[in-house]
Each structure stands twice: as C-alpha cells, then as structure tokens.
Amino acid sequence: MYLFRLALASLANRRFTALLTAFAIALSVCLLLAVERVRTEARASFASTISGTDLIVGARSGSVNLLLYSVFRIGNATNNIRWDSFEHYAKDPRVKWAIPISLGDSHRGYRVMGTNADYFSHYQYGRQQHLQLSQGRPFASDPFEVVLGAEVAQALHYKLGDSLVLAHGIATISLVKHDDKPFTVVGILQRTGTPVDRTLHISLAGMEAIHVDWHNGVPARGAGRISAEQARTMDLQPSAITAFMLGLNSKIATFSVQREINEFRGEPLLAILPGVALQELWGMMGIAEQALFVVSVFVVLTGLIGMLTAILTSLNERRREMAILRSVGARPWHIAGLLVVEALALALGGIVVGLGLLYGGIALAQDAVQASYGLYLPLDWPSVHEWTLLAIILGAALLMGSVPAWRAYRQSLADGLSIHL
C-alpha cells in the first residue's frame, strides 16, 4: 500500500505529464470500447434489419441475392413469381400473415416497392419494432398514393400532398417516366435506420396501374394509352410479384414450410430464413469489421507506448530521487515496484476516464445515432469481452512498466549520486 501512495505522490509531483499520459490512454481506451460496442451493435442491428419475419420467398436463385433485393432493395430478381403461388401460401393455415412485394421502378435513385396494407401492420425491424408514421396515413383505396421513407422525404424535400412521378427501371436517370400517372404523398414513415427509409411504398394496384398500358416493356402510344382516371376503374389485380414475406403461427413449422416451398411443383421457388441469410451476408463483410478493430487496437498500443516513453524519459531526471530512496532504506525491488505501480496507476486512471468518456458520449449521442442510423447503443455495463479487453490493457501496461522498472532496478546508488555533465 505504501508503494501505491508513494507512486501517487510521485505522479502528483509530475502531474502535468501524468495527466497528459493518462488522458492519451483514456482516449485510446474510449475509442477501442466505442469501436467494439459499435461493431457489436452494428452486427445486431444488421441482423435485425428485418425481424419477426419467418420466411422470405422469391424466384429460385441464391439466398443472398433474394435477401438483397427483397430487404435491402439492391439488385434485381432473376424472375417474378405468379400471384396464384402467393395466394396459395397466403391461405395456408400455418401462415399468420403474408406480405407481397413488387419491385422494378424508382424515383430519383430511390427504389419503389409495391405492397399491401399488411406491410404497415406486420413488417418489423430492430427489436420487434413496427413501422410508425411520422406524418399522414398509409395508402388506401386510391392506387395513386405513396408513402415515403424518412430519408426520401428529407433528401427530396417532400411533404404531405406533394405530387411526384415514378420512373421505369432502377437507374438514377431514367428516360422513361410514368408522367401520365402522378402519385400523391399521403404518408411519411418515421426513421428506422433500415432500407425502409430509402423506399417509396405504393399499393400493388398502383404498381399495376402505371404499367396497365405497357406491353413487352414498352409504353403504349396514342389511343392505346390509358389515363389515370381510366386505370382507377380497371381490375388492378397483379398477375405476378417479385417476392413475399411470411409470418407463421408456429416457429416449429418454419423448416417444414420452407422445405415445402423449395419443393413447390407449381414453379421454382426459394424460401430463406432472414436471420441465416443476414449472417451469411455479414460474414462476407467481416474483413472491414476486423480492420476497424485492428486500427483501434493499434491506437491503444500507441497510447501505452506513449506512457512507456514518458516513464523512460523521466528516469534520467529521477536518478537522484531514486538514490535518495535507496539511501533511506529502499531496496532495488522497491524502486522497480514503484515504477510498475506508476504504470498501472496511469493505465487504471486512463481506463476509468475512458469509460467515463464512453458512457458520456453514448448518453449524449444515443438518440441521435438511433434516429439517424438505426443503431441502438445501450448504456449497459461492459460485457465480458470488454472487461477482457480492459484486462489485456492493464496487462500490457504492466509489461511495459516492467521495462523502466528493470532499468531502475539496475541503477546503483553511486550512479544516482554522481554528477553527469
């Protein structure tokens, strides 16, 4: 205990250098833990981009490709699926709800998705969170109504009642637009931090209406064109959709329903478990995640090396101090132990301040980060993995503190009392 008190007194005598060293360690510890917490929560958030959905069904292709276009709105389906195939499983007694998805159009670089009212009731993200409207209402009976994701509304400065025109295809700049059938903004969703924010949602009837006078991918000309008013009076039941999502009454039935869909004789279908596909996709991006962690580890190492440099630099200035301690009865191992305790005290102080900075930053930025990125950073106690990282930092500080300790141990009383020019 006396060594600890002596170490604190010695650090207090060099308080400016000690505080700078401890603060450098604190910043590096804060960065390491912040990166680790963001990595952990980003993985959890990525895995919960869609939640509460048991199966996603589309045309037979790859599981990652189906996940990308149905959930992340990236890429295109290899083929559409028939409407009667969707109805077949939507009416299955094991199915609690079914959400159809129709893709293919865009608006100024943002994807348009056709669906039905069940989407707003059953689609979930994050920790079983339902979609909420910040303004307006969902689309209703009029096929030419659109509900915007939060990012679309903010980036394009849309508000309720505004009119917009959809474009055919998913290119940022499209030469073919459905300008004869404009849509009216009736709702804006709250920000979710998921691809929902970057999506324009219309009804399946609306998706059919803008293509009702198209043939073989080409719009009709002249008398063959059908106006918006004429389209409203027509039967707008789709003949095909891109994919659909299923929620089952029992989780136990998930694998049997999946196997049945994958063996469906009506047409080649693929059913995937969203969680499994998300983990597969995350594994493909794991290199960037590990690189971020390695960078933060090197930042901590830099902070500890700075501590080692500060202690080593002070050794020459403290030779007379060490000699005086030896002259009053301190043994060489006392001197070595003093420097080791100083290193541990600096590291421990840096860890405590780093934790304070981390939790202070989370408390201040928690709501903003969740609103902007959909990333929830909890104010929880450090996890076992984080405690392990902190223990490793203390161990590294002990190891680095042993270097100047060994040098001090070898210094003799005569060397400390001699005059060096």
Image: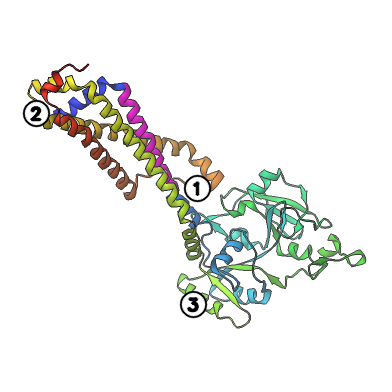
Residue 34 highlighted magenta (yes or no)? yes
- State the residue at coordinates (72%, 46%): 160
Q: Which residues are magenta?
A: 16-38
- CA–CA distance in space, label 3 to label 1: 34 Å
Residue 303: x %, y % from top left:
35, 35
- State the residue at coordinates (13%, 19%): 324
For this orientation, the residue located farthest to the front is: 421
- State the residue at coordinates (17%, 29%): 408
Q: Amino acid at mark 2?
A: Arg
The numbered disc on residue 146 is: none
Which residue bears the numbered disc 2? 331
Look at the image and tell me in which quarter the C terminus lies.
top left
**Disc 2 vs disc 1: which is toward the camera?**
2
Q: Amino acid at mark 3?
A: Ser
- CA–CA distance in space, label 2 to label 1: 55 Å
Compare marks 3 and 2 and give the one earlier in the sequence. 3
Look at the image and tell me in which quarter the N terminus lies.
top left
Which residue bears the numbered disc 3? 256
Q: Are marks 3 and 1 in contact (CB under 8 Å)?
A: no
Which residue bears the numbered disc 1? 375
